[in-house]
Amino acid sequence: MRCLRRRTPSAQWTNKLAGFSQDIDNSSSSTNDSSSTLSTLTKGLPVSLRLEGPYFTPADPYRYKTVICIVAGTGVSGALAIAGAFKELERQSLQVTSTPNSEAERKSSVSTSRIWTRCVVIWSVREEHFIQLPELSSAPSSGLDVRVHLTGPGKQRLSVDDALDRILGEGASSTWVYISGPNAFIAAGEMACKKRQERGVEWYGARWDI
Ligand SMILES: NC(=O)c1ccc[n+]([C@@H]2O[C@H](COP(=O)([O-])OP(=O)(O)OC[C@H]3O[C@@H](n4cnc5c(N)ncnc54)[C@H](OP(=O)(O)O)[C@@H]3O)[C@@H](O)[C@H]2O)c1
């Protein structure tokens, strides 16, 4: 029988968040009163929290050669998970072939041992919301390719059609597109993918409010 281990309360992210506020409270006040924690938080370190989700994605990117994440704003969260899975796959492939005779052998065995060899993340984000996300960083030799599109006053919005055509023109075959962001953005992404269905494009629009 499979035994599920109960997670200790401290392992929950909500407890970690609460612990963070307590740390701030303890450093500036001796009281354990939760309302004073809130006031210390308000008076002390400014904490900005945006809470969303949970989100669900029946993603199976491993079946495709190229995975493209076209994401906007906080919709980047799904792309972080996909990029993380891709980097882990790359790490495992490199481990399997860690003692090759030559660099050429290493490259060829890595590319033949798995289907998914390329992951492109296109992130449209307002300039003032942009932050560097460590999950999207990668080694220069990695197949992870991250393209940030900044928007704001005087800046053009991302054309999903152009972005897709650019990647498909770079020789993408067996392509799956993950789309997430505001509903109008998802609709534009789905339309762009549908138009390219005959070129082997499959897609998933991460809607959660329908
Ligand atoms: N289902 C999921 O897994 C999931 C996960 C996370 C988030 N989400 C959803 O994603 C949404 C993110 O909202 P947000 O407030 O972070 O976004 P936002 O700041 O309003 O917009 C993010 C980016 O998308 C651009 N954009 C918006 N609509 C567009 C369109 N129709 N065509 C082209 N570009 C467009 C914006 O350009 P401008 O600056 O020009 O407006 C900006 O660069 C939320 O609705 C959230 O619920 C879904």
Image (cartoon, rainbow, N blue to C red):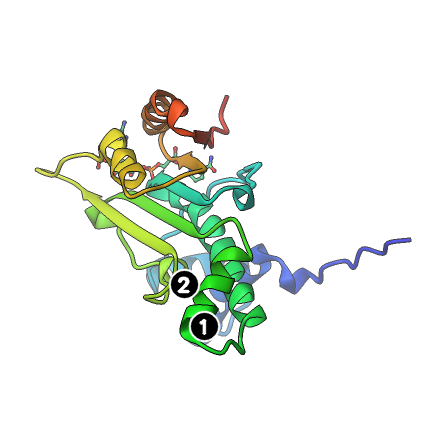
- Note whether ligand 1 is within 8 Å of mark 2: no
The total of numbered circles placed on residues is: 2
Residue identified by numbered label 2? 40
Please report the residue visible at 77 percent of the width from the left and 58 percent of the height from the top: 6
User: Disc 2 on helix, strand or loop?
Assistant: helix
Q: In the picture, residue 58 is in which quadrant?
A: top right
Q: In the picture, residue 57 is in which quadrant?
A: top right
- Note whether ligand 1 is within 8 Å of mark 1: no
Please report the residue visible at 56 percent of the width from the left and 41 percent of the height from the top: 60
- Depth order, front residue of 37/81: 81
User: Height in image: 135 above or below 129?
Assistant: below
User: Height in image: 103 above or below 68?
Assistant: below
- Depth order, front residue of 41/129: 129
Q: What amino acid is found at the position of numbered circle 1 in the picture?
A: Ser
- Depth order, front residue of 181/39: 181
Mark 2 and mark 1 residues within 8 Å of each other at the beta carbon: yes
- Depth order, front residue of 109/143: 109
The residue furthest left is 154
| Left/right of residue 15 with respect to residue 53 in the rendered view | right
Residue identified by numbered label 1? 29
Q: Is residue 191 visible?
A: yes
| Left/right of residue 97 with respect to residue 27 in the rendered view | right
Spot occupied by residue 180 in the image (x, y as percentages of width and height) = 40, 35
Spot occupied by residue 69 in the image (x, y as percentages of width and height) = 39, 42
